[in-house]
Image: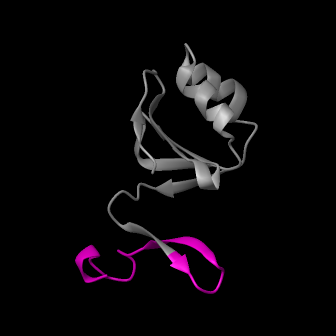
Amino acid sequence: MTKKIKVNSSNLEFVEYIADRKELRIWFLNEKNIIYAYANITQKIYDELIKASSVGGFFNHYIRYQYKFKRKDDVNKDILEVDCPHCLGKVEVNVSIYGYKLEEI
């Protein structure tokens, strides 16, 4: 299970780590509705990030320009993670695009 954590930073607001995907999600203070999802982040890097005396400084030095990322709309309510029978893995489905409500699925 993942947990979105509020961090003490002048630039970052929240971080979330999805260990089985090695994905670090970052919410910036100045971009409230955008998630930056960084790929191939190890548990060690994540642990060092949240323990750093300057979370923003650590992020800028060790993550921001060293790892690939995808910019996503904030998906808190409209994304479901489901098993995909075709790719034999998990996929994220934006249910708002298809007009579903979470109660209908």
The residue segment tinted magenta is 83-105
Q: Where is 85 relative to 77, above or below?
A: below
Image quadrant in which the C terminus is located: bottom left
Q: Where is 100 relative to 78, above or below?
A: below
Q: Position of residue 88 (x, y in %)?
A: 64, 79
Q: Where is 35 relative to 48, above or below?
A: below
Number of numbered tags placed on the structure image: 0
Q: Find the residue positioned furthest to the top.
A: 53
Q: Find the residue positioned furthest to the right.
A: 66
Magenta stretch contains residue 4: no
Q: Position of residue 102 (x, y in %)?
A: 28, 74
Residue at the image position 35 percent from the left and 67 percent from the top: 78
- The reply, left or right, for residue 105 in relation to residue 57 is left
Q: Find the residue positioned furthest to the left.
A: 103
Most foreground residue, 19 or 100: 19
Q: Position of residue 27 (x, y in %)?
A: 46, 40
Most foreground residue, 78 or 5: 5
Residue at the image position 69 percent from the left and 40 percent from the top: 42
Most foreground residue, 76 or 46: 46
Residue at the image position 62 percent from the left and 25 percent from the top: 48
- The reply, left or right, for residue 72 in relation to residue 46 is left
Q: Position of residue 39 (x, y in %)?
A: 67, 50
Scheme of colours in the image: one colour
Magenta stretch contains residue 93: yes
Residue at the image position 41 percent from the left and 35 percent from the top: 5
